[in-house]
Amino acid sequence: MNAPGDAAILELANLESAYDAVVAIRGVSLRVRRGEIVTVLGANGAGKSTILRTISGIIDPIKGRVLFKGEDITSKDPAGIVRMGLAHVPEGREIFPLLSVRDNLLMGAFTRRDRAGVARDIEMVFGYFPILRERARQEAGLLSGGEQQMLAISRALLAAPELILLDEPSLGLSPKLTREIFEIILRINAETGVTFLVVEQNAALALALADYGYILENGRIVMEDTCAALREKDDVREFYLGLKDAGIRGQRRWKKRKTWR
């Protein structure tokens, strides 16, 4: 596990959540250190998205606790959680399709009153995603899938978060575009210090992106370690990376190119 002395921005303790009578996650405990990128891997239906929805207050847990910056936010109102500095980019993006790109960004800043800071952060996200500047007056529903994902991440950044929950950022995107977005997530983390908890099915890219990883099966954490160590474990290599004897060090080559960290 992460060393006990390391500063954790997020801690889950024995978390259990359900949809009606169906328990989706059972006894989930994890820690996210400030400034890290942490990933949760698992198959469809393993409960990955449920973890994020429980953290952000969309789902009330049956039991367990969620601590954010040392404060218990279990079952706290979602808007209050955003105000504390935690933003959630849901699976499927969930942008406002009839609003312009700029208005979507302003919706992300709904908890803020610092107009100058909001204007500065809009320029910041345009720097990360220049296509959004070009599309600023366009209805968001007319964007491509990749552009909508860029907008969803940018909208989260407009809340001035300390932690972003990112649910399946590669969903429906081409490998090239997925890689570009993951590169920008690394830049954002390195340049702004924003912490990320990323749920992702593309295990190879997630393990290349993140510092620490948890593997979820049937609603339970079954393995955790640094991503470097997870990539070398036989079970992970075979069941999540599709590798047996082949080396996987090449999976990290694109991450090694980043010089800003």
Image (tube, grey):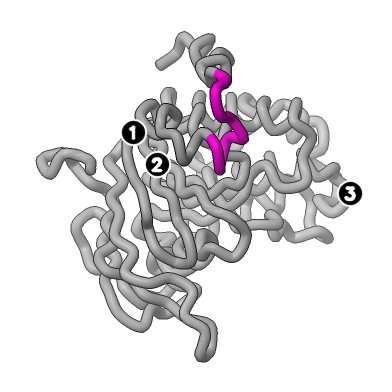
**Residue 174 can be seen, yes or no:** yes
Please name whichever residue, 73 or 36, is drawn nearer the observer in this view of the structure. 36
Q: CA distance from mark 1 to mark 2?
A: 6 Å
**CB under 8 Å between discs 3 and 1:** no
Residue annotated with mark 3: 142
Q: Is residue 198 above or below residue 131?
A: below
Magenta span covers which residues?
238-246
**CB under 8 Å between discs 1 and 2:** yes
Q: Of helix, strand and loop, which one carries label 1?
A: strand
| Magenta stretch contains residue 71 | no
Residue 130 as seen in the image, left or right of residue 106: right
Q: Of helix, strand and loop, which one carries label 3?
A: helix
* Amino acid type of the residue that numbered disc 2 sits on in the rendered structure: Gly
Q: Position of residue 141 (x, y in %)?
A: 85, 54
Residue at x 40% of width, y 41% of height: 213
User: Are there few (<14), some (14-19), or many (20+) residues within 10 Å of tag 1?
Assistant: some
Q: Main secondary structure of the magenta part?
A: loop
Residue 79 quadrant: bottom left
Quadrant including the C terminus:
top left
* Amino acid type of the residue that numbered disc 1 sits on in the rendered structure: Thr
Q: Earlier in the sequence, mark 3 or mark 2?
A: 3
Quadrant including the N terminus:
top left
**CB under 8 Å between discs 3 and 2:** no
Please name whichever residue, 117 or 207, is drawn nearer the observer in this view of the structure. 207
Residue annotated with mark 2: 213
- All told, the count of numbered labels is 3
Residue annotated with mark 1: 226
Residue at x 53% of width, y 9% of height: 257
